[in-house]
Image (cartoon, rainbow, N blue to C red):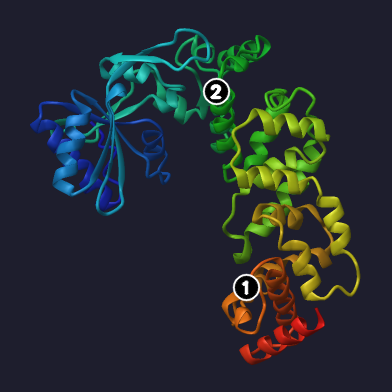
Amino acid sequence: MKNYLLHLDDKLLAVIRRIGKESEKKQFSAYIVGGIVRDIILKRKNCDLDIVVEGDAICLAKVLGRKWSGKVTVYKKFGTASLKTSKGLCVDFAMARRERYAHSGALPAVRPGNLKEDLRRRDFTVNAMAIAINPGCFGWLVDEFGGLKDLSKKTIRVLHKQSFIDDPTRILRAVRFEQRFSFRTEKQTLLLMKAALRKKLPSNVKLPRYFAEFKKILCEADPLKCLKRLHQLDRFHFLDSKLKVRVRNLSLLHQRIQKARRKPLYGQGNWWLIYFLGLLGEADDRVVKRVLMKFPFTKNERISIQQSRKSSDIIRKLLVSNLCSSQVFRILRPLTKEAIYYLRVLSFRAIISRRIDRFLAYDNQVKLCINGEDLKKIGVAAGNRMGKILEDILCLKIDKKISSKREELKAARLSLMNN
């Protein structure tokens, strides 16, 4: 039989062989499963190493953890464990299991099962393949449901008719995989998906879980294709029934995001949130308020969303002619990084781009030589006044009116005398 693992990186291959050998010693059968199998066949990079064991997965993880001096985190209730090796590789181990859903959208109840039962519980045929890693069958593909054929035909297909009923988040996953790989959703699968949408089955899923799946779409290399597809399916209603999305505006925002991300200055950032701010861009305040109440945003994300509501006003301030660098600094400094990035891709005016770029690259990096202790020595009491003096001196430095510590202290004394 064909060995599907031979083209892997030597280091990863060595790890997989070792897992297979330890499994054999314990008289377990171990398999690589899930999306990594799909990507191995497609020869795409994927570092999510998921192992299913017909046997005691936790025991196997602990044995390997000791041998590799790694850290093992056990989830006894689910029969799973995560191993992080001393070299930073993460491997997830799970017992082969079967699932039962109490109702649509519920988290499944799991029981021990065999490999076929484990593969059958997965979302799509292309994600329901396994590769054996025990020495006697190392690299052999296990394909019980035609995943290899669907992969060659570039087709997304569910494994059974209950799939979207059991787990409506699979609707979002279908869109994500379809657009990521330029696949098509098989006719019957698409009919089942649309039937689930008509019955509003996504409303059976707890909102944080559904939003987590939606966030994965926004984290894709090209979220726009997914967002267009969701718009066709009328699938933004889970955010808010009154939310109106204009694909043309999203397309323009996407173009500017892709252009900005090519710049080293904007290489890092929560770009999924920038796309989300774009989705809310034309929503009224009541819609945004409901969205903030419904979903589990972090504090920084909430602030970013609230600040993005003032984008038009901030852009008008940044368009004023003859603004000095410190004036731009005072406008932008209170904003989160994501709110600033959103401003950058929202505006098509070159002067806005230049001013934001300068702020991020230079002015926001300027540091004072003096601090609060220096101000105390010249008679400034701690409190708001001290903060204002430090900010005023920082602005002088940004505008290149002062540069040395001596000049900073001189400016501080002058400020003290004048106030």
Q: In the rendered image, which residue does mark 1 sit on?
A: 365
The numbered disc on residue 309 is none
Q: Is residue 344 left or right of residue 204?
A: right
Q: Please, what is the three-letter code of the amino acid marked with disc 1?
A: Gln
Q: Secondary structure at mark 1?
A: helix
Extreme-bottom residue of the structure: 406
Extreme-left residue of the structure: 25
- Looking at marks 2 and 1 on the same chain, the residue that comes earlier in the sequence is marked by 2
Percent coordinates x, y for residue 288 in the rendering: 76, 34
In the rendered image, the vertical position of residue 221 relative to residue 226, given as above or below: below
Q: Quadrant of the N terminus?
A: top left
Q: Quadrant of residue 393?
A: bottom right
Q: Please, what is the three-letter code of the amino acid marked with disc 2?
A: Thr
Q: Residue at x 78, y 29 (%)?
A: 243
The CA distance from mark 2 to mark 1 is 43 Å
Q: Residue at x 81, y 31 (%)?
A: 286
Q: Is residue 145 left or right of residue 347?
A: left
Q: Secondary structure at mark 2?
A: loop
Q: Quadrant of residue 408?
A: bottom right
Q: Residue at x 75, y 49 (%)?
A: 307
Q: In the rendered image, which residue does mark 2 sit on?
A: 169
Q: Is residue 14 left or right of residue 363?
A: left
